[in-house]
Structures are given as C-alpha cells and as structure tokens.
Amino acid sequence: MMSANAPLVSIKSLRKSYGPYIQVLKGLDIEMKPGERVVVIGPSGGGKSTLLRVMMGLEKIDSGSITFGGEPYISSKGSDKKTVIDTEVRRSIGMVFQHYTLFPHLNVTQNLILAPCKVRGENKVSATKRAHALLDRFGLGAKANAYPAQLSGGQKQRVAIARALMLDPKLMLFDEVTSALDPELVAEVEQVILQLAAQNMPMMIVTHDMWFAKNIASRVIFCAGGVVVEDGPPEQVLGSPKEERTRDFIDRVFHIRH
Amino acid sequence: MALDFSIILRFQEALALGLWMTIKLTLICVVLGCSLGFLVGLARTSRRSLLRAISGVYVEFFRGTPVLIQLFWIFFCLPLILGVELSNLASGVIALTLYMGAITSETFRASLKSIGPEQLDACVALGLPRRVQVTNVILPQAVLRAVPTLLSNCVSLFKESALVSAVGMADLMFVGQNISNNTARPVEVLTVVAIIYFVIAFPLTRAVTLVERRVLAKLAI
C-alpha cells in the first residue's frame, strides 16, 4: 500500500554513460512525492533529457534503480549489468518529446486511439469518444481528422500530449516540449500543461523556459555535470539560489549580467 | 522509299496479343517481385548477420549483372539443374521476378531506414508491443515512402520485359520483331511498338509525381 507521503518516484544512485568516456549521469538521487511538479533545469549536456529518457525506459543504465509507486521498475542486474525494465509499471508513465513524434501516416484521432486499442484492448468506439473529448478540451476538436503534417507545431505538440493522456498516466514526463516551437506557439502548449497541473497531475519537466518553470513548478532541480547541484522550491532555486553554479546559470539565462 | 504506316493496320490483332502478354507478364512480376523485395528488404535490415549476408549476395548479383544474361541463364541452365523443362512464360516470370525482387528490395531498404528512431521512442513511450510497432507504425510508413520509387521500378520492369522476346516469348517486342522481319518495314513497325510502350509507361511516370504531390505531401513523409 502507498501511504500519502511515500515517494511516487524514487531514483537511487543512477549512473548512465554513452561509451566508455562520456558519463552523463553520475550517481543521481531524486525522490518525487505524489502531486509534485518537478522542473529540471541546467546547462545542455547536463543529463536532463537523459534522465527523462531513462525514466521512460528508452535508455540502458549502468547502475542504480528507479521505483514507481514503491515498485522497482528499472534496475541493472547480473554480471553484465543488463538493464531490466518492468513494462507493466512503465505503462503508468507518459512522455512527450521535443519533436512531437506523431505518427505521420495516421490522422489525429488514429494517433490517439492506437495505443488504447492495441495495448489495453479498448474498443474503437469508446476510445474515439474519449479522444474527441480530450481534443475538445485542448481546443483541437476541429482537427480530429487532420494529418499531423497539416497542423502547426503548437497543435502537433498538444496532440502529442493528448495522445499520452489517452493511457491515463500517473506521471507525465515533458522533455523540452516547447524548444522546437516558434515563439508565438509556445503559450498554447504551456497552457495545456498548466491545465494538467491544475488537476494535480504529477509531472517532471525539462525546459529552458524560465518563465514557464516559475509558473508551473512546485519544485526545481538544477542538474549539471550529471549530478543534482541544487534542489528546492522555485522561489529558492530560481530566485535566490544557494549554490554558486546555480546562480551563474540563472544569471546567464535571465541575461542579468552584460 | 517512303514510310508507310498503313501496313501496321494489318497486324493490329497480333500486336494486341503481344501487348496483352507483356502486360500480363509485367503484372505477375510486379506482384511477385514487390513481395519478394519487401521480404528481402527486411532481411537486409535484419539484426541477424546470416540473413543480411544471404540477401546481400542475392541483391548484388541480380543488380550487378545484365537482365538478358539472367534470363538466358534461367531459360537454359535452370532446366538442367532442376531436371524439368520450363515453359517460356515460367522462365520469363522467374527471371523478371528475381530481378524485380532485387531492385525493389533496395527501395524498401531505403524506406525502412528513413523511419527515424524517434518514431520508435514514441512506440515505446506508448507501450506498443513489438508486433504492433511493426504492423501499425513501421510497415505502413515504409510502404508509403516506397511508393514513388516502386512505381518507377514498375515502369522499368515494363520496359525491361521486352527482353523476354529473346527467349521466344510472344510479347509485344517479339511480335513487333516478327512483323518487321516479315514485312521488311522495321522503321514503321518498331516506331509503332515504341509508341505503344511509351503510351503505357508515360502515364505511370506521371502517376509517380501525382502520388508524391497528393499523398506524400499531405502526410509529409
């Protein structure tokens, strides 16, 4: 049984490298409580995106473990350090990527109902009904039969979010979801994520948009060089960071020093 | 000597029969060749090195040698190896299918490779089982992307099929040569035969553009 204060996600000494020389995650420890909205910030190459990809089970790990709702679902086992992923547990997690990754040969509704029908065996009629309700909620009702190529970047990303929500995830991962968008399209995507936040959807967000980070985070983690440098409420980490490296980074992204 | 195209009118029926044979042969070999090509394309992108090696040798051999020699080889050598006499049609079908399989496998291989790894990331993030990833995500995109090149492959096959006349199959080319030999009017007869090939091949090449503009542009793939 999960108690109210038990962590939703528990990451323990997570290590990950690409090849023998490039260590991306150097022993990461993060505990995330239910209902938390964690924004991960930090310089490029600091391991933010890799962390999210590992949590989604898209990358192998060198060592460490991750539990979700108290159940370990990613670990490395045996002498050859094989990454073991419990796909049942992983299904509680949804992810949205920088480059939308919609299926180009399927229209919006088909994109949304593919996984519910094929993974959960939901019938097409009920999945389509849920899909249309979700699209209406995101202001995409008119696009139900459009193909991804006929949508703007902002619309594509909202469809991608809706597609992930079709599986009723208990945690959402957002990996730089507004980085590929034209500036005027960023707000419509952020609005949708704020809408989810208002419903207490737990989420972990990697972003370079500090305004968005401030508005959505219940907690901010500054990640650099493969480790957690600073971790605390947004007012602290973004407003008056304790660590030198965090301060440098925040100053630079807010263009305070010239 | 003046050109006299009226002579062709006397051989309408023979030319029609030849054309029918050419079309029949092309259609059979398109269906069989594309199916073979898809399987070979999968084998060439397989993780198993033995599959990759066998399919690689097959493709390089058939792409790297003249179709005419392949045709003669199958017509003359295969019966010796198998110990059965093959009809003209059978050896023509076997030769052109093997040729079509080799060139379309390259088309399918390229289209399979052009599907980015992020599509697979999305599949994993949605928890799609491997079988669904292949049948609902990878296959349809691979086939759609291959369509323009496959249509070009079909046009090539349609024209290359004229080679079967060399082993005595009564296709359009064979009939044309016969008429031209018997009437001593090669210019008129072969011109008309060329026009017939063109009239059929040209719309097909236009169809390639149409598919690219309409279908693929809509899906942007």
Image (cartoon, coloured by chain):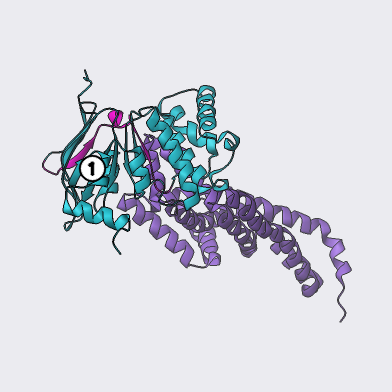
Chain colours: A cyan, B purple
Viewer-closest of A208 and A63? A208
Q: Quadrant of the C terminus of chain A?
A: bottom left
Q: Quadrant of residue B2?
A: bottom right
Which quadrant would residue B164 be assigned to in this image? bottom right
Q: Chain of mark 1?
A: A
Look at the image and say whether residue A90 sits in the magenta stretch.
Answer: yes
Placement of B55 over or under A145, stated as above or below = below
- Number of marks in the image? 1
Residue at the spot x=28%, y=32% of the render? A36
Residue at 38 percent across and 32 percent down: it is A197
- Residue A130 in the image, given as x and y percentages of width and height: 50, 25
* Magenta part of the chain: A79-99
Decide: is B73 above or below B126. below
| Dot 1 crowding, Cα within 10 Å, few <14, some 14–19, many 20+ | some
Q: Tell me the residue that label 1 is attached to.
A: A236
Residue furthest to the left = A79
In the image, B32 versus A73, the foreground residue is A73
Residue B141, position as x, y percentages in the image: 50, 46
Q: Is residue B92 left or right of residue A57?
A: right
Going by the picture, which residue comes out furthest to the top?
Answer: A1
| Amino acid identity at mark 1 | Gln
Residue B165, compared with residue A237, is above or below; it is: below
